[in-house]
Amino acid sequence: MSEYFETRRRLLLSGVAGAALVAASQVRAASGLQRAGGDTTPLPRMPVRQVRTDLLDIGVHETGPQNGRPVFLLHGFPYDIHSYVEVAPILAERGFRVIVPYLRGHGTTRLRDPATPRAGQQAAIGEDVIALMDAMHIPEAVLAGYDWGGRAACVVAAVRRSRCVGLVSVNSYLIQDIAHATNPLPAEIEHGLWYQYYFQTERGRAGLEANRRDIARILWKNNSPTWKFDDATFARAAEAFDNPDYVDIVIHSYRHRLGLAPGYPLHETTERKLAGLPPITVPSITLDGTADGVVPATDGKSQAARFTGPRIHRQIPGVGHNLPQEAPEAFADAVTELVRGGKWRT
């Protein structure tokens, strides 16, 4: 895997693009952002191209053979596509066509029309995946993700089953039960959701606008208490939070999910379908990290009824909320097992 990035780096360094890469590494070195243990080697970056849908201009990283089984890897909040910086080349080497998009409000993904609502609701992020598949002429794919990305994957698997041939989801069934959003959770879980309540206030909106990196860093630490990420790793991801729609989309997401902001008419049809908490019928592998600081790991039984197709649930020891970046081999193996078959159980 490291050889993959080293080869790419050398190819880039042979041309003009290489000069840009050298310049960027010098800027990062000058900024004082260092790798763990004082390593000054530039972090690998996932190059993107832009793909247009009716609503969005989406930044997409793509790797692997064009004729391989398409796999969409969907990141969460507050993270970026580099959650899959190690997963993507593993899957590409195994013959998959790997597509890693920036979600709306992140990175180089932009809403094309200033008049389009900056929606963060679950229907919107699920519809974005379908629109991207259409734009790339991909009729069906494996969808894999965590946090917001896992939710988007679950939405597609539940309401557009013909487009999703398999699902890998961290924390199992992630479609929000908004009708019951005011029901309290156990205090230990509520404690970890402080930012969701903060974002309900205008003070929280202003705080996210002014302190988006500081808030994200706190969430990274709390979400994954065993993950020893370094400054450079965080800084690489934090660039995605400079998106001009980041604050509006994040705030709407957290207000809508708690029933404190209405959804937008553009997404109402899908949202009505999701209100019924439709089951997921496609083959699925669900994962929990045992060190997840947001969603405690379970045996998967409490959500078993939401999966009416074949499903495997497993726990990944010592891993937090950003599971694909913390345990890339385990995540890649789940995708591979899903596609190539396994010992299924319901």
Image (tube, helix red, strand yellow):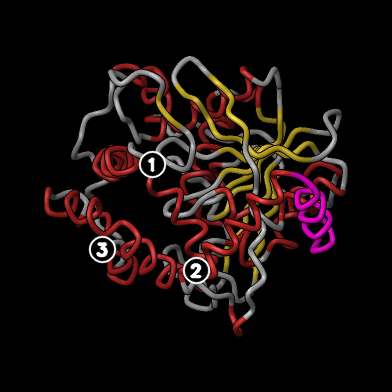
Mark toward the start of the polypeptide (3 vs 1): 3
Residue type at mark 2 is Asp
Residue type at mark 1 is Asn
Residue type at mark 3 is Trp
Q: Quadrant of residue 5?
A: bottom right
Q: Residue 178: x percent and y percent?
A: 31, 39
Which residue corresponds to the image point at 74% horizontal and 53% vertical from the top-left? 334
Q: Residue 220: x percent and y percent?
A: 44, 66
Secondary structure predominantly adopted by residues drawn in magenta? helix
Which residue corresponds to the image point at 19% horizontal and 49% vertical from the top-left? 205
> SS at mark 3?
helix
The answer to whether residue 242 is above or below residue 119 is below
Q: Magenta stretch containing residue 19, yes or no?
A: no
Q: What residue would you read off at disc 3?
A: 194
Q: Magenta part of the protein: which range?
A: 1-15
Q: What residue would you read off at disc 1?
A: 243
Q: Residue 221: x percent and y percent?
A: 43, 72
- Distance from disc 3 to disc 2, alpha carbons, whole Å, reads 16 Å
- Distance from disc 1 to disc 2, alpha carbons, whole Å, reads 27 Å
Contact? badges 1 and 2 (CB < 8 Å): no
Mark toward the start of the polypeptide (1 vs 2): 1
Give residue 292's mark. Answer: 2
The answer to whether residue 140 is above or below residue 85 is above
